[in-house]
Image (cartoon, rainbow, N blue to C red):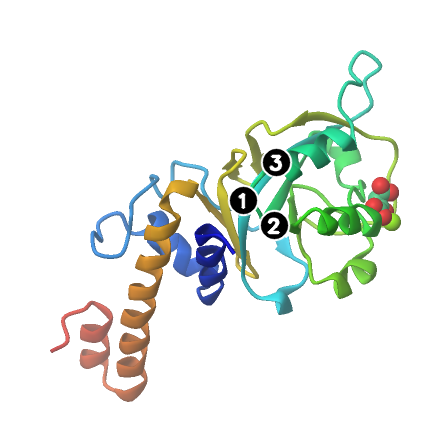
């Protein structure tokens, strides 16, 4: 295992909201928050339209490979699955595939894009999950694979589609990700950060978790309004 893989493994100890807290949620907090993005004005985490299909899998973190699907274009057929698989091969593992569905809304909502066959090939290449701004299918086939599906929903069928781009930056449900970015995801959604911050995110998550465990223990032990407000606002001796 590389050092990076060890840290990605360690990040599974922390939920995605805690990772967002460390990445950018509280920019005024110099102790735990890196302040990498403006919390409201930057697209660094996914919105409520993204749903976690297998919450029982817990948290996952990996490097992003992006792919954009669109309607078949007779003037552009240069890219295929081989190119996508080669891009995954080149990326450090584990990989999370960010699948942009660049389709008219009426078609996008009935595009069961990814399925058991695609996910089996992805797994063979070191992919641990797919995140997409549209639906996919074969939930029952994918469940035993232990791979995560973060989608807007599911639907059973689809028509013809083709690959329009590989490893370009994409927007997935309000999160703009670039190839190589780290994505951390669980039943709360997904967050991204640049790979160079991996060590620091893990270190701060660990400290934040210890701090919040202590704080929640105190909150559970006290039962009067004044003390609870003090504990919450950090003024408790
Ligand atoms: O038809 C497709 O390409 C998607 C699918 O069901 C599969 O990968 O199994
Ligand atoms: Mg299928």
| C-alpha span from label 1 to label 2 | 19 Å
The disc placed on residue 90 is 3
| C-alpha span from label 3 to label 2 | 27 Å
Dot 2, how many residues are within 10 Å of its Cα: few (below 14), some (14-19), or many (20+)? many
- Return the residue at label 2: 50
Q: Nearer the viewer, residue 33 or 62?
A: 62
Rendered image quadrant of residue 165:
top right
Closer to the camera: disc 3 or disc 1? 3
* Residues at discs 3 and 2 in contact (Cβ within 8 Å): no
Q: Earlier in the sequence, mark 3 or mark 1?
A: 1
Q: Nearer the viewer, residue 130 or 232?
A: 130
Q: Earlier in the sequence, mark 1 or mark 2?
A: 2
Residue 33 vertical position relative to residue 161 in the rendered view, above or below: below
Rendered image quadrant of residue 194:
top left
- Return the residue at label 1: 63
Residue in the image at 74% along x and 50% along y: 124
Q: Earlier in the sequence, mark 3 or mark 2?
A: 2
Disc 2 CB within 8 Å of nearest ligand 1 atom: no
User: Is residue 190 visible from the viewing direction of this image?
Assistant: no
Callout 3: helix, strand or loop? helix
Left or right of 45? Residue 88 is right
Callout 1: helix, strand or loop? strand
Residue in the image at 33% along x and 41% along y: 36
Q: Nearer the viewer, residue 130 or 106?
A: 130
Residue in the image at 38% along x and 41% along y: 196
Residue in the image at 80% along x and 40% along y: 111
| Quarter of the image that includes the C terminus | bottom left
Of all residues, the one furthest to the left in this rendering is: 237
Q: Position of residue 88 (x, y in %)?
A: 65, 38
Q: Position of residue 148 (x, y in %)?
A: 66, 57
Of all residues, the one furthest to the front in this rendering is: 1
Left or right of 134? Residue 28 is left
């Amino acid at each position: 295992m590389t050092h990076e893989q060890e840290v990605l493994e360690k990040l599974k100890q922390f939920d995605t909201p805690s990772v967002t807290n460390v990445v950018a949620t509280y920019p005024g907090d110099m102790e735990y928050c890196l302040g990498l993005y403006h919390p409201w004005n930057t697209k660094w985490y996914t919105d409520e339209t993204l749903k976690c299909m297998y919450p029982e899998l817990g948290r996952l973190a990996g490097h992003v490979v992006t792919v954009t699907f669109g309607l078949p274009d007779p003037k552009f057929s240069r890219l295929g699955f081989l190119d996508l698989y080669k891009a995954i091969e080149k990326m450090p593992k584990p990989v999370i595939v960010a699948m942009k569905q660049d389709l008219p809304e009426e078609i996008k909502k009935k595009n069961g894009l990814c399925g058991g066959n695609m996910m089996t090939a992805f797994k063979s290449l070191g992919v641990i999950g797919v995140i997409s701004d549209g639906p996919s299918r074969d939930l029952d086939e994918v469940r035993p694979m232990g791979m995560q599906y973060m989608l807007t929903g599911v639907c059973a069928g689809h028509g013809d589609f083709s690959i329009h781009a590989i490893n370009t930056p994409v927007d997935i449900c309000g999160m703009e990700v670039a190839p190589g970015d780290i994505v951390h995801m669980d039943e709360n959604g997904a967050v991204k950060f640049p790979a160079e911050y991996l060590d620091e995110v893990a270190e701060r998550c660990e400290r934040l978790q210890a701090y919040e465990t202590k704080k929640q223990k105190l909150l559970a032990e006290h039962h009067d309004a004044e003390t609870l407000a003090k504990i919450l606002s950090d003024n408790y001796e």
